[in-house]
Amino acid sequence: MFNFKAKVALVTGSSRGIGKAIAMAFADRGADIVVNYVRHRGEAEKTAAAIEAKGVNCLVVKANVAKDDDVDKMLAMVGDRFGRLDFLVSNAASGVLKPVMELSSRHWNWAMDINARSLLILAQRAVPLMGGCGRIMAVSSLGAVRAIENYTAVGASKAALESLVRHLAVELGPKGILVNTISAGAVDTEALKKFPNRRQILDAARNRTPVGRLVTPADVADIAIFLASEMAGMIHGQTIVVDGGYAIRA
């Protein structure tokens, strides 16, 4: 059920954090990997070396998923190298953390482009490589449905991402391609270090979570592997929440 040998997985933003954990999990199960990055080349190369040490192939591609030309070139490279794509994980994310009254149109457009619109372009370019059978997953966060301080632009873009997943699911299901969202709770990654109240967020999340610990990148990767497997063949257009029960607390 979890043997992905001879299959290919592209994980955007996979040089570190959640994206790296997902890429490594697919590699552990035999898939060839495409590692995508924008700024952290050294970390992307280290991730690629760790992946290749598992006996699978790895293609490292620098591409800004907010730019259509970069996405076009990346998917062309995937086609040239592997001739197929089985799993697409849209994980790369960014955005400005500011109060709503301080947001500019540039801040808003940047978050929307890289967090939501990028999935549209990625899916359009990836589907022809999937050959009528594939999995597309988007990584979201609880900020899509909850108001989080200074998270306005990112949260709105994640909500748009989850809506886009549902619309893609309706159109791509008949083509044999399943599309879902993985919504992660508080995960202590590099991205969270941009929050000025990071420690407060993590402590509050831990105290609020019924299972008594924070979500790890490996927890998110486990769900990606499950959704990629045959066992998830009837899970489609859904948002799977991985938060240890955080969101069920009043």
Image (cartoon, rainbow, N blue to C red):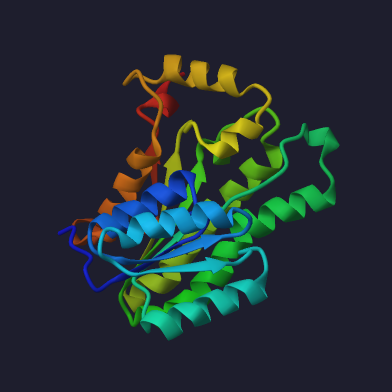
Provide residue 246's location: percent of width, then percent of height.
42, 25
Q: Look at the image and tell me whether residue 91 can be seen.
A: no
Name the foreground residue: 146 vs 207: 207
Decide: is 4 above or below 76: above
In this rendering, position of residue 207 left or right of residue 86 = right
Residue located farthest toward the left when viewing the structure as drawn: 1
Occupied quadrant, residue 33: bottom left
Provide residue 230's location: percent of width, then percent of height.
20, 62
Quadrant (top left/top right/bottom left/bottom right) for the N terminus: bottom left
In this rendering, position of residue 172 left or right of residue 117 = left
Total number of numbered discs in the rendering: 0
Decide: is 175 above or below 55: below
Provide residue 211's location: percent of width, then percent of height.
31, 21
Q: Residue at x 73, y 54 (%)?
A: 110
Decide: is 187 above or below 198: below
Name the foreground residue: 15 vs 163: 15
Q: Look at the image and tell me whether residue 140 can be seen.
A: yes
In this rendering, position of residue 62 left or right of residue 232 = right
Q: Residue at x 41, y 72 (%)?
A: 172
Name the foreground residue: 127 vs 65: 65
Provide residue 243's location: percent of width, then percent of height.
39, 32
Q: Residue at x 60, y 67 (%)?
A: 63
